[in-house]
Image: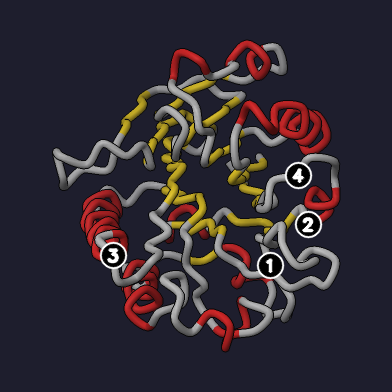
Amino acid sequence: MKIATWNINGVKARIETVKSWLEQAAPDIACLQEIKSVDENFPREVFEDLGYHVETHGQKGFNGVAILSKLPFDEVNRGLPGDDEDVQARFIEGVFSVDSGVLRVVSLYLPNGNPVDSEKYPYKLGWMDRLHAWAEDRLALEEPLILAGDYNVIPQPEDCHDPKVWEGDALFLPQTRAAFRRLVNLGFTEAVRSVTEAPGTYTFWDYQAGAWQKNNGIRIDHLLMSPEAANRLRSAGIDKHVRGWEKPSDHVPVAIDYAA
C-alpha cells in the first residue's frame, strides 16, 4: 500500500491540485498538513467521492491536519498530549486494520519556530519534547507506527541547498536538529534517507527568488517508521514534479510503498 504525506498550504486554494494528485498517485493513506480549515468547512465530499474516508483536526485560517484513507478508521485521536492549553491543530492519529494486523499513522505539522527570539521557538522545542514522550509510549506497543508530516526540521546540511543561509533559522538550529535526532534515535527509521543519500533531495521550495527553478530547496517533510513498520518498507520517494503544477503548494508529497 502507498502512504503519503503532503503539506498542501491551504485546502481551499489547492483543492484541484490535491484532487489531481490523488487521482494520479492513488495513495491508500494520505496525510495532509496546513489544511487551514475548520472541520465543518473541510471539503470532505470531494475526497469521499474519490473513495476516501476523511478525518480532520482543523483550525480556522491556520495549521490543521487531516488523514484521507481508503481503509476505514478503527480509531482516531486528535491533538498531541502533554499540554491542555495548546489549542493549535497540529496532530491527528489514525488506527487501521490491515492484513498483517494493526497500523498506526500520524499526520503532524510541527511548529515552525521562527522568529527564534520570540515565544515561538520555545513552543517548537516544547512540542518536540511532547512528541518524543508520546512516541516513546506508542513504541512500547511494538506495533507498526508511521509519523508522517511537515516537521519543519532540516536534519542535516545535505538536506538544504545552502546551509549557511539557514544557520540562524529555527528549522536548522543545533537544538532543533538534536531534538529530531533524539526522536529518531528512539528506534525510528527515516524513510527517504533509508533509500537514498543523494544530494539535492528536497521537499520544499520557497515561492520567492526562483527557488524552484534553481532547485534551491530544503527537505523538511519526513516519514518516520517504527521498527515494525520499517520492516515492511518497500520503497520511498518524493513526487517532486508536483511543485511544477499550476497553483502548487511550496511543499511536495513524500510517499512510501508499505507491505501491509
Q: Earlier in the sequence, mark 3 or mark 1?
A: 3
Q: Is residue 121 above or below residue 27?
A: below
Note whether residue 44 is visible: yes
Q: Which residue is mark 3?
A: 118
Residue 153 percent across, percent down from the top left = 47, 67
Amino acid, disc 3: Ser
Q: Is residue 30 above or below residue 122?
A: above
Amino acid, disc 4: Pro
Amino acid, disc 1: Tyr
Q: Which residue is mark 2?
A: 240
Q: Is residue 208 above or below residue 216?
A: above
Q: What is the spatial separation of the Cα atoms under label 4 and label 1, in whole angstroms? A: 15 Å
Q: How dense is the environment of label 3, judged by Cα within 10 Å: few (below 14), some, or many (20 and up)?
A: few
Q: What is the spatial separation of the Cα atoms under label 2 and label 1, in whole angstroms? A: 8 Å
Amino acid, disc 2: Lys
Contact between marks 2 and 1 (CB within 8 A): the answer is yes
Label annotation for residue 248? 4
Q: What is the spatial separation of the Cα atoms under label 3 and label 4, in whole angstroms? A: 30 Å
Q: What is the spatial separation of the Cα atoms under label 2 and label 3, in whole angstroms? A: 33 Å
Q: Which mark lies nearer to you, 3 or 4?
A: 3
Q: How dense is the environment of label 4, judged by Cα within 10 Å: few (below 14), some, or many (20 and up)?
A: some
